[in-house]
Amino acid sequence: MLDLAIVIVNYNVSALLRRCLQSVFASVGDISFDVCVVDNASPDDSVQMVCDEFPQVLLIANSANVGYPAANNQGLRALRAEDEDGPRYVLLLNPDTELPPDALATFVAYMDEHPSVGIVGPRLVLPDGSLDLACRRGFDSMNALFYRMIGLSRLFPRSPRFARYNMTYLDEHELAEVDSVVGAFMMVRGDALREVGLLDDRFWMYGEDLDWAKRIKDRGWKVIYNPAVTVLHVKRASSRQNRARSELEFYRAMLIFYYKHYRQSTPFWLHALVLLGIALKGGRALWPDVLAGPKLLERPGFGKQADVAARAAAAS
């Protein structure tokens, strides 16, 4: 049985993808792994680069940008992650990351030694050496998300109450059970994946990792932030190429996540504040989704590129 299936979704960052793959194939340790790169119609030479320099990689070249979770699901299916005899673990990995040589072996060994852990993620650092705050998150209540949205987490970064979302009150070198790690490097136990299913592709490029972690944790699996491994993360290398689109999708993801997991347990006064905050932050292009309420989860093809582009143009 394969130890690890690695899926990398790429969009227009050929040079970063090259360095990422070089670091993956420089990995040491007695583990078996396969790699699938899913390219979301990059206009650069990403596809040709992978073909020329990494022939051992399974490459899926999409003719359109299908979004991050949908592309990850393509890779996971191609690597048979849903099969009962599929890989023991899967890894979602961003192309703007670089791994230390022992990262994969260290985390496979950790998961082997801790069978109750469904997800593990590393300490992620930005190019300037600072911590990528998204690498450990807590959202055990709607309050944590709300405090982050209105800025209290930034005002009180050492508060276990107000800074719960990014858990900035904890030492970044301390192993901790969390609610989610980030999809830039998210190692998931194959049994947990097969229990809850693949990523929800109603998200586009944010929120799907939080949703997956919550679904897995709700089934009783632990989610662990483990700083024994440190991974470089350039961050937003793809999303910064279209900042307006990225901003819209960030707040849309928040809206989807809220309706999926918290609306039914949120009192009306807080519900109104949440919707107001998301509407103001997301801007006019997001207002139709805010007004749609829970019906937005029923829309076929929700979040697809043409739909987003049309509404963004109408609001400009």
Image (spheres, rainbow, N blue to C red):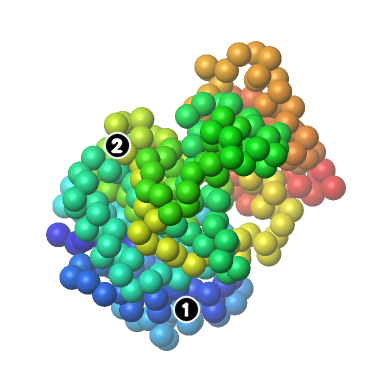
* Residue 227 badge: none
Label 1 crowding class (10 Å Cα cut-off): few <14, some 14-19, many 20+? some
Residue 119, relative to residue 39: is it above or below?
above
Residue at the extreme top of the image, as rendered: 268
Amino acid type at circle 1 is: Arg
Give the image location of residue 240, x and y in percent.
67, 62
Is residue 275 shown left or right of residue 31? Answer: right
Label 2 crowding class (10 Å Cα cut-off): few <14, some 14-19, many 20+? some
Along the line of sight, the residue nearer the viewer: 97 or 110? 110
- The secondary element bearing badge 2 is classed as loop
Give whichever of discs 2 and 1 has the lower sequence position: 1
Residue 282 sits in quarter: top right
Of tags 2 and 1, the one toward the viewer is 2
Give the image location of residue 91, x and y in percent.
35, 57
Residue 53, relative to residue 1: is it above or below?
below
Total numbered badges shown on the rendered structure:
2
* Residue 221 badge: 2
Q: Is residue 281 visible?
A: yes
In three-dimensional space, the C-alpha distance between marks 2 and 1, rounded to whole angstroms, equals 34 Å
Along the line of sight, the residue nearer the viewer: 93 or 285? 93
Give the image location of residue 237, x and y in percent.
60, 66
Amino acid type at circle 2 is: Trp
Q: Which residue is mark 1?
A: 18
Is residue 202 shown left or right of residue 85? Answer: right
Residue 250, relative to residue 124: is it above or below?
above
- The secondary element bearing badge 1 is classed as helix
Q: Is residue 291 visible?
A: no
Residue at the extreme bottom of the image, as rendered: 52
Is residue 231 shown left or right of residue 271? Answer: left
Give the residue displayed 44% in from the left and 79% down from the top. Answer: 50
Give the image location of residue 189, x and y in percent.
27, 48
Along the line of sight, the residue nearer the viewer: 123 or 16? 123
